[in-house]
Amino acid sequence: MSGGDTDLDLSGWSLRDLEAQLRQADEAIRTVSMLDGVARSRNKNMAIREVAILSVRRRRILAEIKRRRKALEIWRANQTLVHSPATPDV
């Protein structure tokens, strides 16, 4: 994984794609974290670095998902107001 992945523009991704990417990042972190009896510190250091990179990517994806879900919630609330029958002013 290159360092450029942390600069990835997520704006063009669908919510479904973002959720899939989040699951993949979680799985990759679990896989890298489960190195059994790492004999060489070099491999361990590489694994730690990869987990750090994946964690940054995961946090960015999760933040984008939360932002979009909140925006969708607000949009739905607005649609309910716009399309609800008007109540008479008393």
Image (cartoon, grey):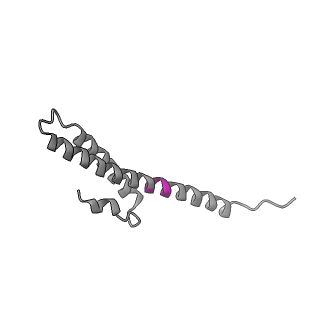
Percent position of residue 21, x then y = 33, 53
| Magenta residues, dominant SS class | helix
Q: Which residues are magenta?
A: 64-68
Question: Height in image: 17 above or below 26?
Answer: below
Q: Report the side of 23 relative to 33 (left or right).
A: right
Residue located 34% across and 63% down the image: 7
Residue 78 is drawn in which quadrant?
bottom right
Q: Report the side of 43 relative to 5 (left or right).
A: left
> Can residue 52 be found in the magenta stretch?
no
Residue located 17% across and 34% down the image: 36
Residue located 25% across and 48% down the image: 49
Percent position of residue 45, x then y = 20, 44
Single out the residue that lies furthest toward the top.
Answer: 37
Single out the residue that lies furthest toward the left.
Answer: 39
Question: Height in image: 48 above or below 20?
Answer: above
Q: Report the side of 12 relative to 89 (left or right).
A: left
Question: Height in image: 56 above or below 40?
Answer: below
- Foreground of the two, 81 or 64: 64
Single out the residue that lies furthest toward the right.
Answer: 90
- Foreground of the two, 73 or 62: 62
- Foreground of the two, 9 or 76: 9
Residue 15 is drawn in which quadrant?
bottom left
Q: Report the side of 33 relative to 77 (left or right).
A: left
Q: Quadrant of the N terminus?
A: bottom left
Percent position of residue 81, x then y = 67, 60
Residue located 29% across and 60% down the image: 5
Percent position of residue 54, x then y = 30, 50
Q: Quadrant of the C terminus?
A: bottom right
- Foreground of the two, 20 or 3: 3
